[in-house]
Image (cartoon, grey):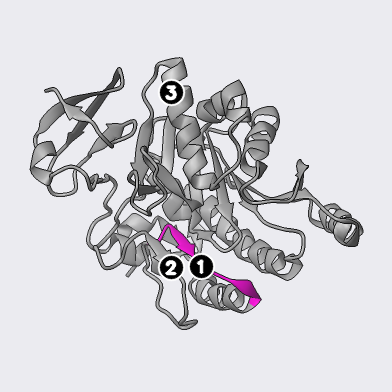
Amino acid sequence: PLDSNLHIINDTYIRPPPGVDQNLTIFIGISTIYEKIEVRECIRKLYTHNNDALARYLGVKKSPVTIRFILGLPNDEYKDKLEEESKIYGDIVILNITENMDKGKTFEYFKWLAKHRKDNYLAKIDDDAFIHLIHYYRDLQDLPRKRAYYGSVYFGNDLGYHATYSYMGGAGFTLSYDLVIDIAGSDWVSLNVIGYEDILVGDWICHVAKEKKYFVHYVGFSNWRSIRQNPFHDFNVDLDLHLPVEAILIHQIKGVERWNAMKDVYFEYEEGLPMLRFIQNSTTNGLVTKREIIPKCWEKEQIWNQTLRYTYKNWFYEAWGFKEGKWYEYYGPVDNIENTG
């Protein structure tokens, strides 16, 4: 028998899951380059089924998630091919910038988003990363609709890049609409667009938050089941790897061979009953809907069962949390914070 939390009978979702906001809209831009024609074809097939499954899960006709490929200006060799691909599929966005990764493409993408999109959340992912849309959509339900910054959190100088603020890993991150608008409209940001894009986005958010004098909700991927099966998973070498059923983002899917392997794994779960194995396994022991984020620079005992207040360069922060996986949240950067409460 199917788990009662699945809300499906014979591949048809008979009602939306309780507590799920069906009006939540998300735009996902997949950053890619023009040469990867075959990779884009694999990704399209995967997300077509993924989006259809999300629509059935929500009990709606059309998925609230829009997916597009984001590219810079193509060279002469690929210009005609890319135009033809765009005419066929209608899912290509060409930014007004020479193709690059860390020389302004992400900021140009944010400017395009500010002009053309009004979704609740706006995301950027790499073309070697896959987002499991049902888990992703469920995970965004608890996020604030404003000033939200979501992804795989790196705290300050975790990776040795001398960052003094937290940021989300570049494989995939999500921002609320208002944050993108503020970043795209910032003169300071427009002059600081060269460097590792994921670290830069964290820097941009710190700057606009200080400039606008507001808090930002930094929220990491939920941990659905266990430490061993984290929601962020690298798909590295073994093409027969059993992927964690609760994975939200799967990374390191390099090349057509790995995308085809990923497609085979995914379609094994999708044929007939989209997402059935993923959802059933994830809900067997009760669906975990709250996050527990423990910044590495804080001791656990500091945050349990109390509210903390912090100051840092004239900023004001709050953090709260409880044991056993209950809600924990923090605002702003975490390095060099002085506990004043």
Comes first in the chain, label 3 or label 1: 3
Residue 227 higher or lower than 186, as above or below: below
Q: Is residue 250 magenta?
A: yes
Residue at 46% across, 74% down:
236
Residue 301 lies left or right of residue 17; in this view the side is left
Where in the figure is residue 168, as x and y percent of width and height? 43, 46
Amino acid, disc 3: Ala
Q: Which numbered circle lies on residue 164?
A: none
The answer to whether marks 3 and 1 mark residues whose Cβ atoms lie closer than 8 Å is no
Residue receiving disc 1: 252
Q: Nearer the viewer, residue 75 or 48?
A: 75
Amino acid residing under circle 1: Gln
**Residue at the (71%, 66%) spot, across then down:** 41
- Disc 1, SS: loop
Residue 322 at what x, y percent from top left?
13, 40
Q: Are marks 2 and 1 in contact (CB under 8 Å)?
A: yes
Of the two numbered discs 2 and 1 on the same chain, state the one appearing first in sequence. 2
**Whether residue 178 is visible:** yes
Looking at the image, which is closer to me, 71 or 298? Answer: 298
* Left or right for 320, reference 172: left
- The residues colored magenta run 247-256
Mark pair 3, 1: CA separation = 32 Å
Q: Residue tagged by mark 3?
A: 209
At mark 3, the secondary structure is helix
In the picture, the quarter occupied by the N terminus is bottom left
Mark 3 crowdedness (10 Å alpha carbons): few <14, some 14-19, many ≥20:
some
Q: What residue is disc 2 on?
A: 234
The residue closer to the viewer here, 153 or 120, is 153
Residue at x-position 47% and y-position 80%: 237
**Disc 3 or 2, which lies upstream in sequence?**
3
